[in-house]
């Protein structure tokens, strides 16, 4: 049997659709899900610890109200987004077969990536606004602020590249599966 016959047999193979969710369901003990859960727990505890002490430790009471609201809102937005990402990773199977599930996951991942990039970047910008809101800026401080904004932009670009690679990898898998 040559490679072309194998490819044709593979294309014509019809997987069983009954019990697919049970076969592909992510178990509690998988390493990927545990890693996501651990990262989520550390992230949430860090954000919540910061929110618990920012008002007194970082003089939140002396900052403008808008800066406090932006900070708290953006951090809560990141926490909620991380929780939805965890739930999405936990329930990855959503189609009749593997190809449908992967295609649906690929579309959802694109949307999740955009929201992830926005929430992370906006939360860093809001953190910067919070700390800068009560400072009188001079030339030196303006340059430092410019450097921090540049760091936020670089971080956003790096996150964009990471997400692009992830999405491309899934897209390549779907493409290979279809050919």
Image (cartoon, rainbow, N blue to C red):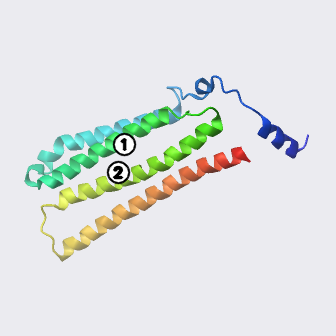
Question: In the drawing, what numbered circle is on residue 119?
Answer: 2
In contact (CB < 8 Å): disc 1 and disc 2: yes
Q: Is residue 93 left or right of residue 155?
A: right
Q: Residue at x 82, y 38 (%)?
A: 9
Q: Residue at x 19, y 58 (%)?
A: 131
- SS type, badge 2: helix
Disc 1/disc 2 C-alpha distance (Å): 8 Å
Q: Earlier in the sequence, mark 1 or mark 2?
A: 1
Q: Position of residue 102 (x, y in %)?
A: 60, 40
Foreground of the two, 54 or 74: 74
Q: Is residue 86 left or right of residue 73?
A: right
Q: Residue at x 39, y 59 (%)?
A: 155
Q: Position of residue 77 (x, y in %)?
A: 30, 45
Q: Residue furthest right?
A: 1
Relative vertical location of residue 88 with respect to residue 116 in this rendering, above or below: above
Other residues around mark 1 within 10 Å, as few (<14) / some (14–19) / many (≥20) = some
């Amino acid at each position: 049997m040559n490679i072309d016959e194998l490819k044709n047999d593979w294309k014509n193979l019809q997987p069983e659709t009954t019990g697919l969710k049970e076969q592909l369901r992510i178990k509690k003990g998988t390493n990927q899900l545990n890693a996501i859960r651990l990262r989520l727990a550390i992230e949430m505890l860090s954000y919540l610890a910061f929110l618990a002490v920012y008002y007194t430790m970082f003089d939140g009471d002396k900052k403008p109200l808008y800066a406090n609201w932006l900070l708290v809102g953006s951090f809560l937005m990141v926490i909620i987004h991380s929780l939805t990402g965890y739930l999405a990773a936990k329930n990855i199977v959503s189609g009749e077969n593997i190809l449908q599930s992967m295609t649906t996951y690929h579309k959802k991942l694109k949307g999740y990536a955009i929201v992830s990039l926005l929430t992370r970047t906006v939360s860093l910008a809001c953190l910067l606004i919070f700390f800068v809101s009560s400072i009188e800026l001079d030339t030196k401080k303006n340059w430092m602020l410019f450097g921090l904004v540049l760091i936020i932009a670089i971080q956003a670009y790096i996150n964009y590249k990471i997400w692009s690679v992830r999405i491309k990898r899934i897209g390549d898998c779907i493409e290979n599966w279809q050919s």
